[in-house]
Amino acid sequence: MTPSNSMQPDDAGVAFIPARPLEAACAHVLESATEGREFCVISPGRPLPQAQPARPGYLQCETSGSTGPAKRIRRSLRSWQACFETDRDLWDITARDRIAVMGPLSNSLTLYGLFAAQHLGATPVVIDTDRPDERLRRLAEAAPTLLYTTPTQLRQLGTGVRGSVGSVRRVLAGGGFLDRAAREAAARLFPKAGLTGFYGAAETSFITLDETGGAEGSVGRPYPGVTLRVRDDAGRDLPAGETGTIWVESPYLFDSYAAGTAPDTRWDNGFLSVGELGWLSESGALFLAGRRSRMFTVADRNVFPEAIESFLLSLPGLTAAAVLPEPDPARGNLPVAFVSGAGLDTGALLAACRQRFGAGAAPRRMVTLDALPALSSGKPDLRALAALLGQGA
């Protein structure tokens, strides 16, 4: 594949690469990495940024932007290469493997899979289409052996799409909790594959691995090379079972933001937090409460929308769910749930939430949509949903 002249800026700066057309984007990315030139893949429809000085041996990738404007993070290629070597040992990856990812190359997980295959001598399979049936067809044609994916992508594939891919021996799913619908979809679509969940962020890369695929409710135990701490607001380590801020130290962490800021992202003596809250069990398993930036209060009680979303997605019929706060003069906020799925009984869903979370934290109303507005990563677009509540972009 021969790169075109669309790569910007000039050779002295960061190579900003449009995510589409896919073949040209892959060629640009691999060429830039081979030359040691810093690059960044830009999401479809976004303008290319202005020229920026480059740092040899680094790359940039975009965050999902589900709760605000997308940021660009900068990390060294070495930080990902350390993950690739660990993946090789964990999954016995060889040159005979075919590593598949789904979604635009601007998504950090898609970019990770492309580089993992290149570094490990395997064959990359990048499938960039939004149609679940077309995704499954292309997967079947490509016959990958490993698949990096997200729970959202698994749920989308599992909704009304027939067929399976017998070549896949391992499904690695991250970017969200592996709920019942995602686990069932993985079992049906990839019947010969083991399912592993992983938790992390674009800034941290892998933090934990869960071989139960989310069945035990945790996101697993530390990925090799990762040290985890849960601390209170004063920086003190908390005992097992107490909720606090999650801090991580590893060789896989990002360097800095190249564009945008995140007030909840903090460093402390080599440890990094992105504002996620949770707790550790006595056995060292990590449980998530939610993002500090998404937490809201109802009558002075902290509510974590991620917990309600995970519960809703465990119920039959739902394909997507998002919970947002709606201002209320008496209680401060009231939770509102946006859902999509087939044949939904919103009254029964609201009652199930009240039974699980209590009348205070449960959604007070439920909005059904044919499909929730989504980002290129497949995650719900929370800013678009907030606009539907009249809260602006």
Image (tube, helix red, strand yellow):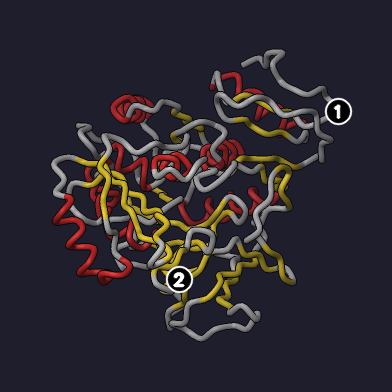
| Residue that carries the numbered disc 2 in the rendered image | 286
Where is residue 159 drawn, in percent x and y? 23, 37
Asked if residue 97 can be seen in this view, the reply is no
Question: For the N terminus, which image quadrant?
Answer: top right
Asked which secondary structure carries label 1, the reply is loop
- Residue under pointer 1: 12
| Most foreground residue, 80 or 287 | 287
Disc 1 crowd rating (10 Å Cα; few below 14, some 14-19, many 20+) is few
Query: Residue at coordinates 30% horizontally, 43% vertically from top-left?
Result: 155
Quarter occupied by residue 37 = top right
Residue 156 location, x and y as percent? 30, 38
Residues packed near mark 2 inside 10 Å, few (<14), some (14 to 19) or many (20 plus): many
Residue 44 location (% of width, % of height)? 55, 25
Side of 151 where 387 appears, left or right: right
Quarter of image, res 382: top left
Drawn side of residue 195 relative to residue 184, left or right:
right
Q: Given contact means CB atoms under 8 Å apart, are the residues at marks 1 and 2 in contact?
A: no
> What is the distance, in whole Å, between disc 1 and disc 2 at their CAs?
43 Å
Give the residue at x 68% y 13%: 4
Amino acid type for the residue under numbered disc 2:
Leu
> The residue under label 1 is which amino acid type?
Ala
* Local SS, label 2: strand
Number of marks in the rendered image: 2
In the picture provided, is 197 more to the left or to the right than 104? left
Q: Residue furthest front?
A: 329
> In the image, what residue occupies the spot 56% across and 24% down?
45
